[in-house]
Each structure stands twice: as C-alpha cells, then as structure tokens.
C-alpha cells in the first residue's frame, strides 16, 4: 500500500486487508486489499466477482477466512457496536412480507435505539415512500422493496452505508432521485459503497471505482483514471471523414496505429495510445485533403472498460 | 409508478426497547399468513379428545392416555416445528434475518425475543387446543393440566428448534429428526433421553397434574411440577445453544 495507491482511500473508514473468503471450493474473494473513505465508491464486476461477498464481509454478515476487515478500526464480525456505525442494503429481494414499510423502518430504528419518533417517517420521505408507508411489503414491486430497505438503512443515520445493487428494479425517475440521494450522502462525508450492474449508473454515482474480477481487485480509481492506467490495452477510435479508404491507408503508416477497419459507421482505428493518435490524425487528413467529420473513442465507457478487464 | 397512496400518517411513536421490538416483530412477521393453519392444531386436538371417549377407562385416564399422548406426540411438536422454523430458520434462508442481525442488539436478546414471540404465538394456538381436547374428551377437570403441559412443552420445543435453526442449514429436517428419531424412538427406549425430551416431559406434566392411575407415569421421568421444572431447564439449554450458535452464524447465502 502506498499513499497514492488508488485502491486505498485517504481517511479510510473501512479497511480490507488481504481478505480471502471461500465457500467450499469456490473462492469468492482472494487476498483483496483496499479501503473506503468518505464519498461514494462504486463496486463493479460481473456476477460472481465477489462484490456482494465483499459487502457482506464489510458489514460482518460473513467472516473472512484469512485477512482482516475493519470498520472504523473495529471488527464488524466480533464487535456488535460496529452496527451502530454501518448499514447494509442487501441485494436480496427478501423482506418481512407481513410488515408494512413503516413497520420495517421502525423495527430497525428500535433495534438501533433511535429515539427520535419522527426518524422513520423522515427516512421514508427521503426515498419517496411515505405515501406507501402503510402498505404491506408483500405487495411491493422490486424497486419499492429496495427503497424500503434503503429507508430502513438510513433511519439509523449511519456514517458508513453499504448498498448492494440499490437501484435494481427502480423506475427511471427513482433511479435519478436515489442517485442524487446517494451522492448527497457521500458529499455529507459519509462512506457510501455502491455496487451496480448498470455501469452507467456507477459512472454517475461514484467518485471512485473499484473493479472486482474473480474475487480480485482488477482496477481502482476514477473511471477515466482506470482507463488511463490501461495504456497497454488496445482502444478503438471511430473516425468519420469524406474519404475513409484513403485515410485508412495513410493511417496504417502511423506508428501508434495497430490496425484499421472500415465499418458502416466509419473508419475504426485500433491503437495502443489514443492520445498520440489524436495528435497524428489531423495532420495526416490535412495532408491528404480529407475532411474529418468526427473523431470519437468507441470504448470510453465503463462498459467497454469492464469488457476489457474481464476478457 | 404504480404506488397507491395509503394512509400517510407522519406522526411518530416513541422507540421501544429492543427486546420488546423483537417480540412484537416476531409475532407480526412469523404468524402463518393463512388463518386456517392456526385452526389445524385446534381441529386435531378436538379430534384426539373425541377419540379418548372410545376408551373404556375413566375419562381423565382416557384423556391422558389417548388425547394427551396425541397432543404431545403430534399436535404440540408439529405446531412448534412450524413456528420454530419461522422464528429463525426460514428468515436465515431467505436473507430477512439480516435486518435483525445487522444491529447492535446482543445475540441473547435476539434469541430471547424470538423465543418469547414464538411462545406467544404457540400459546394463542395451543392453549385453546389443549383446553378443547380435554373438554372434547369429557374431562373438563384436566383443562388446567393440559394447558400447563402444552405451554411448558411448546416453550421447550421452541427453544430447541431455535437452537437447531441457528445451527443447521436444513432446520426442518433436523427438527423432524429430533422429534421422530430422538424423542419417539430413542426416548421410548431410553429413560435418559426421555428425561430431556419436551414431548415426554410434557406428557409427564399432564400425568402428574391430572393425577390418574400410577401406571401412566413413566419411571425415571419427573412428573407434575418437577417435569415443568425440567422443561424450563431444557428451554434454558436450547436458548443458550441458540445464542452461542448465533455468534458464528453466516446469515447470508454464498450467492454473489
């Protein structure tokens, strides 16, 4: 670990130290070392990457087989008081179906000794659940259940909030509202850890991204920083011009170009160094008298980054 | 968004102590959703009470021998098995238990709260059933003893089923193993097993408090209030095991 290692957050509240978790023969986390601090951190990875396992280990739901997990310096598995400081929104759809949303939130508040009688309603209001607060959870959609669980987590006013796929099932309007809420919680100085399969949401949500693949940390940092750290991986740039064939032939002579292909959308150039390519394209086109209409990286989204990481 | 507005009361209420919250939650969340399931033990108890009338023996003796035995062999353990699984095992399997586990509440408080909630549910179901069985058997003087036996037996059963729920991935299977293999088979052969068996002890409570002929009292097993004391001991052991097992519980599946 170094001060500049993007896997580690400054002022860390949650520390994961060489943690490994396995279930029988299946290794869910493998010597994972990272930390989380104030602000929103996104956890990214395919199914089975270890995201939920990491979140469960951080909240003490499961024990790590080797290594350590610490929340504010304490072991969440051994120290029950840690749960006054951390809350989890689990991915499981399961909720106590017989209860209403208000009853669930009040139950969690009672267990945490929340004395403010209005806290439950405030938490429900934060996720726009107040109008449905007295309906049984049994009749809720997946998105509404998620929001009820978020309210149950927020009622304890936790400094550390762990959200496992919290936007699952939410409609577009609620996605925007919840995203804004989580960003606001992060801006307040809380440690917010969010996992999501919808990668564009992680881009919108998180200041920092950790990418897990096969239980290991594949990348860490801002999503652009992760991209920059992958200079040895090929990138694809779409170039639209009025004469793509001549431009393609000329670009093959440029050292940074690894390959070209003509597609319906335009000329797709494969390069190891996109920055150098951007500098080189304009003079080449000008020399040929070719007019450039668009130069655009095709894989600057987290989706493409993720595909490369897991390839 | 298809939310249908319900009542929108924004008034809060003072917080409850964690134990009271867990008991209230247990009663609210673990009662079977179909009301007819609550009536099945009552129907079974009445049936077994009526069967007691077919015996030529005195009504109190016939009730203890037939109705009481059926209550503590079938009605009480099966009712408690269903309730006991809902108290912990079913919630652990579904992931719902995380709402309780992820709190600063002590494990012992969680276990006692769940057990008390289960005992309340069991009492609501089994007290009328036990009374109805005695009345149906034509032995109304046995109502009190039948109720004490059913309540004591269910309290011990629920504690054991809680311990099993906290210890095994398939608590229903292990609970059946306890009731059928350990209690019925081993307990019938070995007095040492019967001495710690909720079923045998509850039956002994009924025998002792009803006061019928001595041949109904099993040798080596305490009778009457002594058996109630033994049931309390069994319950305490079950609760202690459940509390200890909860410490090492992984209340989440291995799915990612």
Image: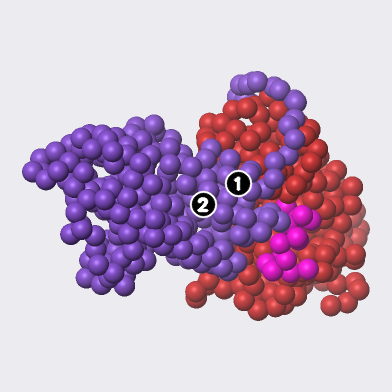
Q: Quadrant of residue B171?
A: bottom left
Tell me, yes or no, whether the highlighted magenta stretch contains residue B142: no
Range of the magenta residues?
A: A74-87
Q: Residue at x 33, y 45 (%)?
A: B145
Above or below: residue A136 compared with residue A81: above
Q: Which mark is residue B115?
A: 2
- Which chain letter matches label 2? B
| Image position, residue B93 (x, y; %) | 48, 55
Query: Looking at the picture, how far across and down is residue A293, in whole percent?
Result: 83, 44
Q: Quadrant of the C terminus of chain A?
A: bottom right
> Chain B's shade in the image?
purple
Task: Classify residue B234 as left or right of residue A93.
Answer: left
- Residue B200 seen in this snapshot: yes
Residue B29 % position (x, y): 52, 40
Residue under label 1: B22
Residue B132 image point, x, y percent: 29, 35
Seen from the viewer's position, the closer of residues A276 and A54 is A54
- Chain the render paints red: A
- Dot 1 or dot 2: first in sequence order is 1
Which residue is drawn at the image coordinates 33% and 34% (left, top)?
B39
Image check: B16 left or right of B40? right
């Amino acid at each position: 670990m170094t001060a500049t290692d993007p896997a580690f957050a400054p002022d860390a509240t949650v520390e994961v130290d060489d943690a490994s978790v396995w279930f029988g023969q299946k290794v869910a986390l493998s010597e994972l070392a990272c930390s989380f601090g104030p602000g929103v951190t996104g956890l990214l990875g395919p199914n089975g990457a270890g995201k939920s396992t990491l979140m469960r280990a951080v909240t003490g739901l499961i024990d790590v087989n080797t290594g350590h997990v610490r929340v504010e310096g304490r072991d969440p598995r051994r120290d029950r008081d840690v749960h006054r400081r951390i809350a989890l929104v689990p991915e499981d759809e399961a909720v106590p179906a017989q209860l209403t949303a208000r009853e669930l939130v009040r139950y969690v508040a009672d267990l945490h000794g929340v004395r403010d009688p209005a806290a439950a309603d405030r938490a429900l209001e934060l996720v726009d659940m107040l109008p449905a607060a007295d309906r049984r959870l049994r009749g809720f959609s997946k998105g509404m259940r998620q929001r009820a669980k978020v309210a149950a987590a927020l009622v304890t006013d936790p400094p550390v909030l762990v959200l496992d796929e919290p936007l699952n099932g939410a409609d577009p309007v609620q996605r925007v509202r919840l995203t804004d809420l989580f960003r606001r919680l992060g801006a307040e100085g809380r440690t917010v850890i969010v996992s999501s399969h919808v990668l564009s949401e992680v881009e919108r949500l998180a200041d920092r991204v950790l990418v897990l693949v096969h239980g290991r940390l594949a990348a860490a940092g801002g999503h652009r920083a992760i991209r920059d750290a992958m200079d040895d991986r090929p990138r694809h740039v779409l170039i639209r011009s009025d004469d793509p064939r001549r431009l393609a032939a000329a670009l093959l002579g440029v050292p940074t170009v690894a390959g070209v292909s003509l597609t319906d959308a335009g000329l797709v150039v494969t390069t190891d160094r996109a920055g150098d390519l951007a500098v080189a394209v304009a003079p080449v086109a000008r020399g040929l008298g070719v007019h450039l209409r668009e130069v655009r990286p095709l894989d600057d989204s987290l989706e493409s980054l993720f595909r490369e990481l897991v390839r | 968004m298809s939310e249908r507005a319900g009542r929108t009361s924004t008034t809060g209420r003072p917080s409850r102590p964690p134990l009271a919250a867990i008991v209230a939650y247990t009663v609210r969340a673990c009662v079977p959703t179909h009301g007819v399931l609550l009536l099945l033990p009552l129907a079974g108890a009445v049936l077994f009470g009526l069967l007691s009338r077919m015996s030529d023996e005195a009504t109190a003796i016939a009730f203890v021998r037939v109705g009481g035995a059926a209550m503590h062999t079938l009605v009480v353990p099966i009712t408690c098995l269903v309730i006991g699984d809902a108290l912990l095992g079913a919630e652990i399997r579904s992931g719902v238990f995380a709402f309780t586990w992820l709190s600063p509440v002590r494990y012992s408080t969680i276990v006692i709260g769940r057990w008390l909630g289960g005992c309340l549910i069991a009492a609501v179901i089994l007290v009328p059933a036990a009374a109805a069985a005695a009345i149906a058997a034509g032995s109304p003087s046995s109502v009190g003893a039948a109720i004490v036996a059913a309540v004591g037996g269910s309290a011990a059963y629920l504690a054991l089923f809680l311990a099993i729920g906290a210890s095994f991935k398939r608590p229903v299977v292990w609970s059946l193993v306890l009731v059928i293999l350990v209690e019925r088979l081993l307990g019938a052969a070995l007095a040492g097993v019967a001495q710690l068996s909720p079923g045998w002890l509850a039956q002994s409570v009924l025998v002792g408090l009803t006061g019928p002929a001595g041949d109904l009292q099993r040798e080596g097993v305490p009778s009457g209030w002594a058996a109630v004391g033994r049931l309390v001991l069994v319950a305490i052991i079950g609760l202690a095991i459940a509390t200890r097992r909860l410490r090492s519980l992984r209340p989440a599946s291995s799915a990612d």
